Image (cartoon, rainbow, N blue to C red):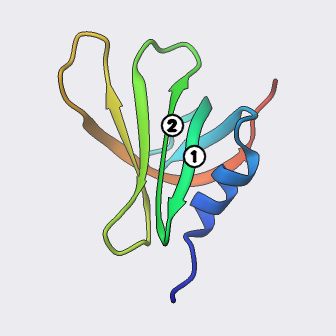
Amino acid sequence: MADLNRIAKRIHHISPEPVELTLNEGTTAVFHITGAEFFQQEFQAEGVREDDDADYRFITSTDNESILVGRKGVDESGWTIVGTVAEVNRGRS
């Protein structure tokens, strides 16, 4: 069995405490993650971003190399991929 994604493990380890995520395009924000879990190698979590009313979803890519970040705004019916997680740190409470 292949290893679990290291970024997903870090998110899982820190949550439910605030998690500071840096996305691949350089955006850094604090997220409050709920329901972070693994299904074998696959990772899935949901959460909210401070200063944003949208919902966020975090999932492993099909090759398990990246954590994709999806966003669904209050008035939106579907999810939009907004990037991948490049870095994970403990957020400030």
Between 53 and 39, which is closer to the camera in this rendering? 39
**Which quadrant of the view contains residue 61?**
bottom left
Residue 15 at x, y = what percent?
70, 41
- Name the residue located 71 percent from the left edge and 36 percent from the top edge: 16
> Mark 1, residues whose alpha carbon is within 10 Å: few (<14), some, or many (≥20)?
many
**Position in image of residue 78 (x %, y %):** 19, 29
Q: How crowded is mark 2: few (under 14 residues within 10 Å), some or many (20 or more)?
A: few
Quadrant placement of the C terminus: top right
Which residue corresponds to mark 1? Answer: 36
CA distance for labels 1 and 2: 21 Å
Percent across and percent down for residue 10 are 69, 57
Are the residues tagged 1 and 2 within 8 Å (C-beta)? no
Q: In the image, what residue occupies the spot 80% across and 28% down?
A: 92
The residue sitting at 54% across, 24% down in the picture is 49
Q: Position of residue 12 (x, y in %)?
A: 66, 52
**Mark in front: 1 vs 2:** 1
* Residue type of the residue flagged with mark 1: Ala
**In the drawing, what numbered circle is on residue 24?**
none
Look at label 2 and name its amino acid.
Thr
Tell me which label, 1 or 2, sits earlier in the chain: 2
Q: Residue furthest left?
A: 77
- Residue at the disc numbered 2: 27
Mark 1 secondary-structure assignment: strand
Kind of element beneath mark 2: loop
